[in-house]
Every structure is written in structure tokens, then in C-alpha cells.
Image (tube, rainbow, N blue to C red):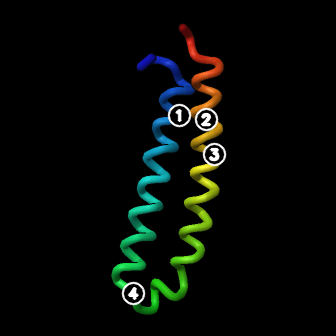
Amino acid sequence: MDEDPLFIIASIACIVVLAILALGIGSFAKGGEFSKKHSNRLMRYRIAAQFIAVLLILAAVFFGKS
């Protein structure tokens, strides 16, 4: 399973979701001007990235080698 390209892409997508989530939570915690300008946009990006990651995970499970 480690050599399955779809699994690798799905894993990278999960890491991207985690990075966006961490950046968004960090902006909420810090507050200030950056939070006011970008926190809502970051959470929308997270939702889109999470949707793509879930689709890739489902594709990896469906098309994965047994």
C-alpha cells in the first residue's frame, strides 16, 4: 500500500488539510488584523481541501489493491 500513488496523494491531501487547519487555528488564537482579514477564508479553504481529501481517500479505498 505504500507504493500506491493514490494513497500517497490522499496522504498529502490530509497533511495539507492539517496545515490549513493549524494556520486557521493559529490566526484565531492570535487575533488581530490577520485574523479579521483571513480567518474566514482559511476555513473555507480547509473545507474545500477536506472535501478533496475525503474523495481521494474514498478513491484509494475503492481502487486500492487488495
> Looking at numbered disc 4 in the image, what kind of residue is underneath it?
Gly
Q: Give above or below for 1 relative to 37.
A: above
Labelled disc at residue 39:
none
In this orientation, which residue lies closer to the viewer: 66 or 4? 66
> Which mark is nearer the camera, 3 or 1?
3
Q: Which residue is mark 3?
A: 52
Name which residue lies at 48% across and 44% down. 14
Residue that label 1 marks: 9
Q: Vertically, is 41 above or below 52?
A: below
Separation of residues labelled 4 and 1 (CA atoms)? 33 Å
Q: Which residue is mark 2?
A: 56
Please identify the quarter of the rendering in which residue 24 is found: bottom left
SS at circle 2: helix
Say whether disc 2 or disc 4 marks the residue closer to the N-terminus: 4
Q: Which residue is mark 4?
A: 31
Disc 3 crowd, CA 10 A, few/some/many (<14, 14-19, 20+): some
Q: Which image quadrant: the N terminus?
A: top left
In x, y percent, where is residue 56? 61, 35
For the residues bearing labels 2 and 3, Cβ distance under 8 angstroms: yes
Cα distance in 3D space between marks 1 and 2: 7 Å
SS of the residue under disc 3: helix
Amino acid type at image mark 3: Ile
Left or right placement of residue 53 versus residue 28 in this view:
right
First in sequence: mark 3 vs mark 1: 1
Mark 1 vs mark 2: in front: 2
> In the image, residue 11 lies at what x, y percent?
46, 36
Whichever of callouts 4 and 3 sits on the residue coming sooner in the sequence is 4
**Discs 1, 2 touching: Cβ within 8 Å:** yes
Q: Which badge, 1 or 2, comes first in the chain's sequence?
A: 1
Could you tell whether 50 is left or right of 20 in the image?
right
Displayed quadrant of residue 34: bottom left
